[in-house]
Image (tube, grey):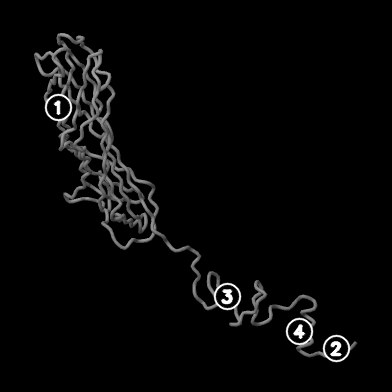
Amino acid sequence: MHLRRTGTSIALLACIVGACGPVSGTDPNNPEPNPDGGKVADGGTKDGSIADASPPLTLSEVTFHGEALGLPDVKLDTGLVPKNSLVQLQLKIVAAGETTVDASAYASGSEAAPVLTAIPGSGKVTIKGQYAILSRLVVKLADVPNYDGPFPGIDNFNIEFGNHALFDPYLLDGKSATAKANLNEAELPDIPLPGNIPGNLKITIEKGSSVSAEFKGTCAAIEGTTAAYTGTIKRSGKFVLKLAIEIDVPLTGKASFPLPDVTLPIALPAEPITLKPSKVIFGKTPTKGEEAKIGSCN
């Protein structure tokens, strides 16, 4: 066979033995032809723009939660009343429960330049609990069994309360939110007297009985990835009971023995509360909301 020495023949022979380079207009790492006739730059697209492999940012929520005792050290001991009466009652009332505060904010920016923006309407202050009542009854009437001892019908008798209020964090600059739990005026079911005494105790929760918890923000801050939110809680209110004892006395019939109203005032000084934050992860910048200061609450 006779081969003519031409440029095309030499190029063809070189490809046959594996010594030729890429054909102009192709990418050796991509068999598809490049219509622009050149290699696509790393991280780019065929039109020359830079590709973004990161997903778009979303809002990133930070939640805050704080707890405190509902009505600490709120209690009352009436002693035996009325004094020098043939029928006397002693009540010991102890309040229990809890107060909680919750709020949320969005974290945006970066660790070097963080932003903590409150979520409007995410704040919630809650108070809930109960009054526990213990008692002692003394009866020294003729023609009925005498008695001096506990009143099982009242012991461990609980009256519950609770409510909440929503707010826009951070409640700084004197703003506040108050959760008020009203106890409706109500006459409770008659409680039979102990010791085989023929009669009942009547209890009425008086109008105006309530418990309130007021929350005020004192500081909202972010420093790096550490968020902080602090405030104060102040409880107030009163608990009023109207009492009467009725006894069926042989020969004379039913006799009523009124007792003094029992009033438990609630006026606790404001105390600090710290809301613990969840983990801070930075996300998209929100469109509205109060911003926390840069720094700490210490």
| Label 3 vs 1, first from the N-terminus | 3
Visible residue check, residue 233: no
Asked whether disc 4 touches disc 1, contact meaning CB atoms under 8 Å apart, the reply is no
**Label placed on residue 40:** 3
Q: Is residue 36 left or right of residue 286?
A: right
- Per the rendering, the mark at residue 262 is 1
Residue annotated with mark 4: 11
Q: Are marks 4 and 3 in contact (CB under 8 Å)?
A: no
Disc 1 element: strand
Query: Looking at the picture, how far across and down is residue 96, in whole percent?
Result: 26, 30
Q: Specify which label sits upstream in the sequence, 4 or 3.
A: 4
Residue 261, relative to residue 123: is it above or below? above
Tag 2: amino acid: Leu
Residue at horizontal 50%, vertical 65%? 53
Name of the residue lying farthest toward the right: 1
Between tags 3 and 1, which lies in front?
1
Instruction: Name which residue lies at 13% across and 14% down.
Output: 252
Does 71 sit above or below residue 12? above
**Dot 2 or dot 4, earlier in sequence:** 2
Percent x, y of residue 27: 64, 76
How many numbered marks are there?
A: 4
Q: Nearer the viewer, mark 4 or mark 3?
A: 3
- Badge 4 density bin: few <14, some 14–19, many ≥20, Cα 10 Å: few
Q: Residue at x 77, y 79 (%)?
A: 15
Three-letter amino acid code at disc 3?
A: Val
Q: Of the residues under marks 2 and 3, which one precedes in the sequence?
A: 2
Q: Tell me the residue that label 2 is attached to.
A: 3
Whole-number angstrom distance, CA of label 2 to CA of label 3: 39 Å
- Element on which disc 2 rests: loop
Binning the other alpha carbons within 10 Å of mark 1 as few (below 14), some (14 to 19) or many (20 upward) gives some
Q: CA distance from mark 4 to mark 1?
A: 113 Å
Distance from the alpha carbon under mark 3 to that under mark 1: 87 Å
